[in-house]
Amino acid sequence: MFAYPGLVAGSWHLPILALHLSATSIMVGVICFVQHVHYPLKSFVGKEQFAEYQTQHVNRTGHVVGLPMVVEAALALLLVVDTGIHGQPLLALAGLFLLVGVWLCTAVFQVPEHQRLLSGYDPKRHHRLVATNWIRTVLWMARAGVAVALLVGRS
């Protein structure tokens, strides 16, 4: 990749890498909680309440994940554009590809299943939501490893 000297002052390299790791770590925590606790518990919500429960889930989740996801994406792009921040262009590119995988998985699997579940509980849809969410869980955990490696490699 190309380094653009001066895009980010050298004194800001470690804080940028630490913020990148923080945003990714927040998302790893959220996705692990969702995968191991929240999504499986959806099957215990009564049929009468499920549509409202799902509506609330969809509406409230954005409040928790919106900012960390945007910060993570912006920093992942910055780390690819300005390799002088970390000196590990292939690792930064790998991190970006993992994040693209997360976002694609979200768009292709999670968003459509959540939309379908808005009309009520469907065991097949619920199973698909949980099963395909493992993809995001693994991708985000791998991203955390990349974020740690970028920070440790620089410090």
Image (spheres, grey):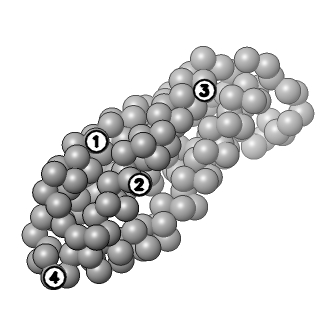
- The x and y percentages for residue 90 are 60, 17
Residue at 40% in and 68% down: 58
Q: Secondary structure at mark 3?
A: helix
Residue type of the residue flagged with mark 1:
Thr
- What's the mark number on residue 132? 1
Q: Earlier in the sequence, mark 3 or mark 2?
A: 3
Relative to 116, does residue 154 appear above or below in the rendering? above
Q: Nearer the viewer, mark 4 or mark 1?
A: 4
Residue with the mark numbered 4: 48
Residue 29 visible in the snapshot? no
**How far apart are the two marked residues, 3 and 1, measured between alpha carbons?**
25 Å
> Of the numbered discs in the image, which one, if any, rests on residue 111?
2
Question: Which residue is drawn at the image coordinates 49% and 70% (left, top)?
Answer: 63
Q: How far, Cα to Cα, is label 3 from label 2?
A: 27 Å
Nearer the camera: disc 3 or disc 2: 2
Mark 4 → mark 3, Cα distance in angstroms: 47 Å
Answer with mark 4 or mark 1, whichever residue precedes in sequence: 4
